[in-house]
Image (spheres, rainbow, N blue to C red):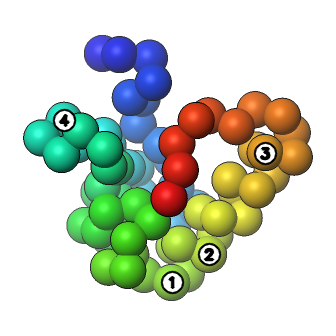
Amino acid sequence: MIEAYKPIHLPCGGVAYFEVESGISYRCEMCMAVVGSVGMPSYCRDEYRKTEMLDILAGKQKGYTF
Ligand SMILES: [Zn+2]
């Protein structure tokens, strides 16, 4: 597995796996929605954004974006 495509653990309790078919997105296994998309439940997206912000503040932005 390529290092950059490691699964993301989301605050909703699900794990998002990189979709090799699309090549650009992660899909939350719990919500069955693409991470960052409108189909993603707001609670999951909001929590995820908070987590991402904390990562940015901590200086460890992983390089994935919405
Ligand atoms: Zn989710």
Residue 46: image tag: 2
Residue occupying image coordinates x 38% and y 29% = 5
Q: CA distance from mark 4 to mark 1?
A: 25 Å
Percent position of residue 36, x then y = 45, 65
Q: Amino acid at mark 2?
A: Asp
Element class at badge 2:
helix
- Asked if marks 3 and 4 touch (Cβ < 8 Å), the reply is no
Q: Give the class, few, some or many, for how many residues have Cα within 10 Å of label 3's Cα (few <14, many ≥20).
A: few
What residue is at 70 percent from the left and 37 percent from the top? 61
Q: Cα distance, mark 2 to mark 1? A: 6 Å
CA–CA distance in space, label 2 to label 4: 25 Å
Depicted 11 relative to depicted 61: above or below: below
Q: Earlier in the sequence, mark 2 or mark 4?
A: 4
Q: Quadrant of residue 4?
A: top left
Which amino acid does the dot numbered 3 rest on?
Ile
Residue placed farthest to the left in the image? 21
Instruction: Say whether disc 4 or disc 1 marks the residue closer to the N-terminus.
Output: 4
- Looking at marks 1 and 3 on the same chain, the residue that comes earlier in the sequence is marked by 1
- Quarter of the image holding residue 30? bottom left
Q: What residue is pinned by disc 1?
A: 42
- The answer to whether 60 appears left or right of 16 in the picture is right
